[in-house]
Image: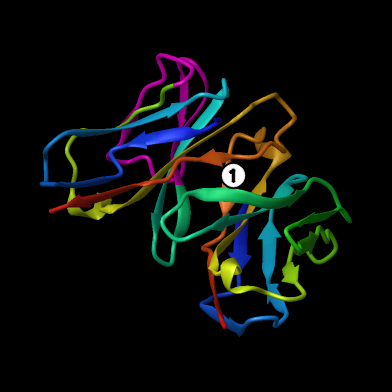
Amino acid sequence: EAQVTQNPRYLITVTGKKLTVTCSQNMNHEYMSWYRQDPGLGLRQIYYSMNVEVTDKGDVPEGYKVSRKEKRNFPLILESPSPNQTSLYFCASRHYSGSAGTGELFFGEGSRLTVL
Amino acid sequence: GDSVTQMEGPVTLSEEACLTINCTYTATGYPSLFWYVQYPGEGLQLLLKATKADDKGSNKGFEATYRKETTSFHLEKGSVQVSDSAVYFCALSDRAGGYQKVTFGTGTKLQVIP
C-alpha cells in the first residue's frame, strides 16, 4: 500500500529536550516536505527536499533541522524544542519532475507535538 | 509572493444543501490549483485539481473551475452529505517557483448536519 508514515503520532516533551519525528514513504518520490498546521494559519511549510542530499528552507524553518540521506526518509529534528513549536506536523511527498509540478502531494497522518 | 485566500469557516449546512467554498489566489506565474480535504484525525488528501485556465476539476460530486480572469478556484457541490464533514484546503503550486512549493490556504471547516 502506498503511504507516508510518520512517528510518533503523539508526543509530549519538555523545553530543550531534543526530539526527532521520522517520516518514510514507499512510493519512490523525489520530493518530500514538512508542514506544520496551526489554528487560523493553515499549513505552513518548514523544509522541503527535492532529492537525496538536497534540502531547502520553507516559510518557517527556524528551530528545525532536516536531513535527506536516503530517498525514502526525511526526518524532522527539533534540537531544542520550545512551547511555540507545539503544533500538528505533517510530512508529505510527491514525484518531482522539473516543470511537471501538477503532481498530487501524499500526506502522512500527522504528528501532534506538545512542548511544555 | 504566492498566496491563497479562502472563506472563513466554519460552514454549517443541512444534508442535501448546496455548498460553495470560495478560494482566490495570487501567483507570479501560471499555477496549478488544488483542493485537498482533511477528515477528522487524518492527513490531507487530494480532492481535485486543475492545471490551466478554464480547466474543471471534479471528484466525488465536488467541482471547481480554474478562473484566471478572477484568479479564483471555488469549490462547489450540489448536495452535501454528512460524510462530507471535513476541513477543505485550497492550494496552488506555481511554475514560476519551479513547483518547489505548494502554498495552502487556511482551510475551511465544513459541518453537515442530518
Which of the 4 image quadrants contains residue B93? top right
Instruction: Provide residue A73's location: percent of width, then percent of height.
Output: 41, 22
Q: Which residues are magenta?
A: A45-72
Q: Is residue B84 visible?
A: yes
| Depth check, front residue: A79 or B79 | B79
Q: Amino acid at mark 1?
A: Val
Q: Residue at x 10, y 46 (%)?
A: A14
- What residue did someone put label 1 on? B102
Pointer 1 indicates a residue of which chain? B
Specify the quadrant that holds the C terminus of chain B.
bottom right
Instruction: Provide residue B101's location: percent of width, then percent of height.
Output: 58, 39
Look at the image and name its color scheme. rainbow
| Depth check, front residue: B16 or B54 | B16
Residue at the far right: name it: B54
Helix, strand, or loop for circle 1? strand
Which of the 4 image quadrants contains residue B3? bottom right
Instruction: Provide residue A48's location: percent of width, then percent of height.
Output: 48, 32
Q: Residue at x 59, y 44 (%)?
A: B102
Q: Is residue A14 above or below residue A38?
A: above
Q: Is residue B107 left or right of residue A82?
A: right
Q: Residue at x 61, y 85 (%)?
A: B14
Q: Is residue A15 above or below residue B86?
A: above
Q: Is residue B1 visible?
A: no
Q: Residue at x 84, y 47 (%)?
A: B52
